């Protein structure tokens, strides 16, 4: 599977956010997107998910232009900007409710993901009582729990303690070996520089590839 | 379905608890006024629930009539826009837009029914009007009427996002129809005119399906526009 972004530009009311972006995402690789706040990373990821329409250009999932077909990409999970759940429900209940929509996984898998993120002791607390880092972890759990083919994570490590970030990086590397497409966006390059295969920088309106010297 | 309903119910009643309480307080005050001014329990009941207004003279009934409509328009707007707030990716990468919109309509329908039926039960007791058959028939017609308005409103919202000119033209057209037919909106007035009731029901269904198609087609405008 691959995702091709071809000549994509995005304007909001004549304000150009992205201009002529070209990139191909392939299986078994981790892609990093860096850039200042407001450089268009989240907008780009929303277009990848089909929530925003490119002003020109196209995005193809295995050759299918899902934006034209007015659907959202399948087997893709994303966390874009702030994680947001139903505040009256517990972390676990929120994930369970989301998992029920497609019915691919049950309690076991959900709890397993929560354990990996060291969130299992807080899973029965209400979301409104969660700290910033815990909210962020729940957002990541939501992306990972159903074992999707494509994982899109926007500023994933916000507020999460270093030890868990370290483990998460290892986890993502494992997922990559299993043939996933992983796209990470951040304004702090160091967060992801160690694990990405390709790095792209959002600069002004354009996106350019950055060489990685490891 | 469970996700959409839970989210809507939790949000709506939590964020609007004061408002809902306020609506009841306003209607309670009005019921005192109505009890002084009307003789029969039926008149009191009809007045509180805004089922009829005299369109030739300005009166408190007119205010209550529109008050009820505004309340249920607010519900639609609130639930309609709550869907685009927060993390859309949680839901929309799992559920197709069309299905989601169908569930959303169910949840709007349920919130509407819940509020309406509590109005009817409480104010039937307060006004002392217990003619079960009549209350039930008002209730049914009222619900059909309100849902028709809600569906029309959603339709106009979709138009607004898609094409402002179409939106203006259709709004004018609909307002025109209402004026030409002299507000055939009053529940009490159309009570015996099953033809009108049927027309409303057909309209509600028609726009229910049209809105479903629109929801899928205009999802992107909605996501971008309501950030
Ligand atoms: N729905 C929208 N409507 C109008 N402007 C938007 C919208 N979404 C994002 N923008 C603008 O696009 C620019 C890029 O934002 P964003 O992608 O969130 O940046 P970041 O790289 O920090 O994630 C910002 O100037 C923002 O104001
Ligand atoms: Mg961002």
Image (spheres, rainbow, N blue to C red):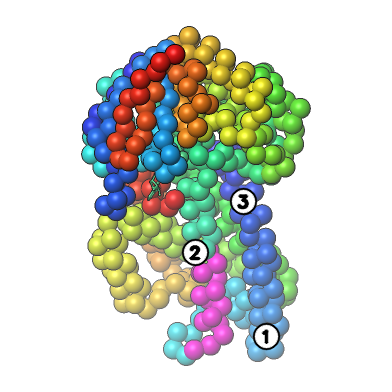
Which residue is identified by label 3?
B11
Question: Where residue B187 is drawn, which disc sits there?
Answer: none
Q: Is residue A204 above or below residue B157?
A: above
State which region is magenta: B58-73
Question: Where residue B73 is drawn, which disc sits there?
Answer: 2
First in residue order: circle 2 vs circle 1: 1
* B63 or A205, nearer to the observer: A205
Residue A34 in which image quadrant: top left
Which residue is identified by label 1?
B33
* A148 or B152, nearer to the observer: A148
Q: Secondary structure at mark 3?
A: helix
Q: Chain of mark 2?
A: B
**Residue at the limit of the structure toward the top, as seen here:** A177
Q: Are marks 2 and 1 in contact (CB under 8 Å)?
A: no
Residue A60 in which image quadrant: top left
Picture coordinates of residue B8, whole percent (x, y)? 58, 48
Asked if residue B65 lies in the magenta stretch, the reply is: yes
**Residue at the limit of the structure toward the front, as seen here:** A213
Of tags 1 and 3, the one toward the viewer is: 3
Q: What predominant SS class does the magenta segment belong to?
A: helix
A14 horizontally vs A94: left or right: left
First in residue order: circle 3 vs circle 2: 3
Of tags 2 and 1, the one toward the viewer is: 2
Labels 2 and 1 share a subunit: yes
């Amino acid at each position: 599977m691959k995702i091709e972004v071809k000549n994509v530009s995005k304007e909001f009311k004549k304000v150009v956010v992205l201009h002529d972006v070209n990139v191909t995402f392939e299986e078994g690789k981790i892609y990093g997107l860096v850039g200042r706040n407001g450089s268009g990373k989240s907008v780009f990821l929303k277009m990848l998910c089909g929530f925003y329409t490119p002003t020109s250009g196209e995005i193809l999932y295995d050759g299918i232009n899902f934006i034209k077909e007015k659907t959202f990409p399948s087997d893709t999970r994303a966390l874009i900007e702030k994680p947001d759940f139903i505040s009256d429900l517990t972390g676990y209940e929120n994930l369970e409710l989301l998992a029920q929509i497609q019915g691919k996984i049950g309690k076991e898998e959900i709890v397993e993901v929560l354990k990996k993120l060291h969130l299992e002791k807080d899973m029965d607390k209400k979301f409104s009582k969660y700290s910033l880092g815990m909210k962020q972890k729940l957002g990541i759990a939501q992306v990972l729990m159903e074992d999707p083919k494509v994982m899109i994570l926007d500023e994933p490590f916000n507020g999460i303690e270093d030890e868990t970030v370290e483990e998460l990086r290892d986890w993502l590397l494992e997922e990559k070996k299993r043939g996933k497409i992983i796209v990470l966006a951040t304004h702090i390059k160091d967060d992801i520089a160690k694990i990405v295969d390709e790095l792209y920088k959002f600069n002004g309106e354009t996106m350019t590839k950055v060489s990685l010297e490891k | 379905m469970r996700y959409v309903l839970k989210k809507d119910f939790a949000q709506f009643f939590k964020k609007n608890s004061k408002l809902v309480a306020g609506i009841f307080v306003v209607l309670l005050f009005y019921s005192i006024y109505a009890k002084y001014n009307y003789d029969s329990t039926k008149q009191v009941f009809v007045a509180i629930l805004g089922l009829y207004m005299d369109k030739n003279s300005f009166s408190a009934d007119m205010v209550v009539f529109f008050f009820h409509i505004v309340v249920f328009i607010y519900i639609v707007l609130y639930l309609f826009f709550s869907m685009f707030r927060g993390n859309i990716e949680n839901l929309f990468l799992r559920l197709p837009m069309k299905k989601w919109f169908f569930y959303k309509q169910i949840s709007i329908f349920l919130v509407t029914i819940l509020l309406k039926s509590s109005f009817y039960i409480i104010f039937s007791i307060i006004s002392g009007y217990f003619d079960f058959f009549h209350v039930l028939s008002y209730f049914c017609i009222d619900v059909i009427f309100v849902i028709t308005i809600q569906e029309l409103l959603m339709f106009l919202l979709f138009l607004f996002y898609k094409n402002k000119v179409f939106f203006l033209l259709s709004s004018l057209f609909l307002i025109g129809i209402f004026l030409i037919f002299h507000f055939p909106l009053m529940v009490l007035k159309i009570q015996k005119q099953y033809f009108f009731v049927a027309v409303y029901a057909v309209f509600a269904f028609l726009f229910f399906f049209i809105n479903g198609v629109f929801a899928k087609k205009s999802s992107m405008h909605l996501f971008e526009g309501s950030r």
